[in-house]
Image (tube, coloured by chain):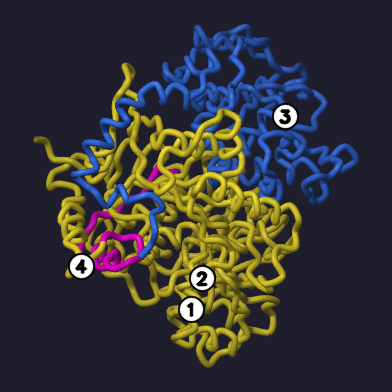
Amino acid sequence: MDKFENFTGVVCPLDRANVDTDAIIPKQFLKSIKRTGFGPNLFDEWRYLDHGEPDQDNRNRPQNPDFVLNDPRYQGAQILLTRENFGCGSSREHAPWALADFGFRVIIAPSFADIFYNNCFKNGILPITLPPIEVADLFAIADGPEALRITVDLPRQILEISIIRDRLGFAVDPFRKRCLLEGLDDIGLTLEHLDAIRAYEDRRRPQAPWLFPGNGLEAR
Amino acid sequence: MDAKTLYDKLWDEHVVRYDDNGTALLYIDRQLVHEVTSPQAFEGLRLAGRKPRRVAANLAVPDHNVPTRDRVQGIMDPVARLQVRTLAENCTAFGITELGMDDPRQGIVHVIGPEQGFTLPGMTIVCGDSHTSTHGALGALAFGIGTSEVEHVLATQCLLQRKSKSMLIEVNGALGSGVTAKDLVLAVIGEIGTAGATGFVIEFGGETIRGLSMEGRMTVCNMAIEAGARAGLIAVDETTIEYVRGRPYAPPCAPQSPEFERAAAHWRGLVSDQGAAFDRRVRIDAAAIEPQVTWGTSPEMVAPVDGRVPDPGDECDPVKADGIRRALDYMGLTPGTAIIDIRPDKVFIGSCTNSRIEDLRAAAQVVADRRVAESIKLAMVVPGSGPIKAQAEAEGLDRVFIAAGFEWRDPGCSMCLAMNADRLKPGERCASTSNRNFEGRQGRGGRTHLVSPIMAAAAAVSGRFLDVREL
């Protein structure tokens, strides 16, 4: 995973609560066996006026002019601003893959769904939870004629807000912060504790042998 | 020692270690694998030169993409076919047992896990699917994960986790006639909201929950995720133990072996201790619950069958009012419409929420000697697994459904998420026993109303929603 570096990006305001992962990336695109290429189909059903299918040339499809991602003010946005419970529903990691592939690196919301929140960190996306009042203020600014830009400083956990020249702090789990900043491979880190895993299995096996069937796990 | 919740007990039994900031390395006993969220995980293993740590702890099944009819012809959609074939190839390459499309045990991943005894009480269970919460009905800690974590579990048999907060939803009182586990859980979600349990593991308790069959308990835990919970749990009791006894992958029973009784003795301790502290408690009166129908695009947008579609003008929270307005616009409904005046075009009985034998029996009882209404374009039953389909056929349920005008299909996820050919056309309205009424969930522009199997059956024969008790 690439290291997460500080950046300044345009904010795209998606003013809806409970945006689910079916909306983020509809099911027909889940048939892919790859991790990449989902960006053109991010929010497919809201973004285009026709029905999208995999392996289609998306450049010639009719765009929905009322959808915020198609608004000229927000072209090249790297920060998504949205409402409560973003990413609810299915566990599909295709949702953060699509967001990252599109170019989003930070998502700001008052709350996130649990599985989606975890999945973001595995894909170099920083989900930031801010109090509803701060999110409401950001929406008010982002809706103006001038593009709102935010500088994301992960090491100091600070957002610098353009236009109003304000700063907001945010919280992040220290372990996840480190993984993002160093681009760490979770699996590699866990395998450093292989001795502890083996010790656990050795302790557990005699206590609960039914948890450790033999090779092949054949049903009777 | 302090009184522990069921969640505390399951958690403590599975902690391998804690790191300095309190993140746990949690041991995972079982992983269920399906075709949609696994290919990139296997690819990741391959790229890193890693192998699954314990192949026998994994069981794979294709379910999301499989056709529900004319299966002998294989999968017509080439992209779906490649995904299902990729699962089979990955399972062969890594030595994982797969119940393939032509295996009589094939079915929806969350139906076959408990059915085969692969998922058992006291286990930690994961799957790259949010409805993994279903298995919590067995007194197991079960939750959905993303593909990176699928790979992590394959490689390490562990996950990095922070402990969630705990919520007890205590349901007491008798469910009325015609009121099912599905209505109960929809009413709970209506009460606490679709994010009401975000950050929590829910334990469902109380006499009403104890009175539910295992099928009913699975329906309840299945939809814990629709309230945002990390997992749903129900304490082990004799109903749980009798359900598990004799299942193919369960520990062998007496007289051949004492192992089942030994396991059962351990499982009987998987209950919250008297006086255990929960971070939040919610009390629900079962007697007050009526058959439920969702009217919007989130499972919390639900009303009793004798209720009406709300008016966004009555909502003071502007974000919520906007959500209601958008939902009604998408659903093609006007504020104040009576639920019983809503007319579905299609009826879907199936999904990991409601495709088990008890669901099919109850629905069949409603449609027996009746006909699907003229206005219904399609009514279909998709059993949750091969064994459920076989059992239903042995009981003659298939003939009841077919005689009434239903289609009787092969097992799979089907129109719950419409990844296969079973889907709604734009504007079509469906009475569905599934779990999500999101925009486009059952097909672009499709309109989903979540209901219980008997409410879906009643809608099929009457052409509109009605209180199943009046039929």
- Alpha carbon distance from label 4 to label 2: 26 Å
Same-chain check, marks 1 and 2: yes
Q: Residues within 10 Å of mark 1 (few under 14, many from 20)?
A: some
- Find chain A in the image and tell me its colour: blue
Q: Earlier in the sequence, mark 4 or mark 1?
A: 4
Please give the chain letter of the residue carrying mark 1. B
Q: Position of residue A135 (x, y in %)?
A: 56, 25
Please give the chain letter of the residue carrying mark 3. A
Q: Residue beneath label 3, please? A: A102
Amino acid type at mark 1: Ala
Q: Earlier in the sequence, mark 4 or mark 2?
A: 2
Residue sitting at x 58%, y 60%: B416
- Alpha carbon distance from label 3 to label 4: 58 Å
Residues at circles 1 and 2 in contact by the CB criterion of under 8 Å: yes
Outermost residue to the right:
A60
Q: Residue beneath label 1, please? A: B390
Extent of the magenta region: B226-251
Amino acid type at mark 3: Phe
- Alpha carbon distance from label 3 to label 1: 46 Å
> Closer to the observer: label 4 or label 2?
4
Q: Residue beneath label 2, please? A: B104
Secondary structure under tag 2 reads loop
Residues at circles 4 and 2 in contact by the CB criterion of under 8 Å: no
- Alpha carbon distance from label 4 to label 1: 28 Å
Residue sitting at x 70%, y 29%: A101
Q: Residues within 10 Å of mark 3 (few under 14, many from 20)?
A: some
Q: Position of residue B242 (x, y in %)?
A: 25, 68
Please give the chain letter of the residue carrying mark 4. B
Residues at circles 3 and 2 in contact by the CB criterion of under 8 Å: no
Residue sitting at x 42%, y 18%: A175
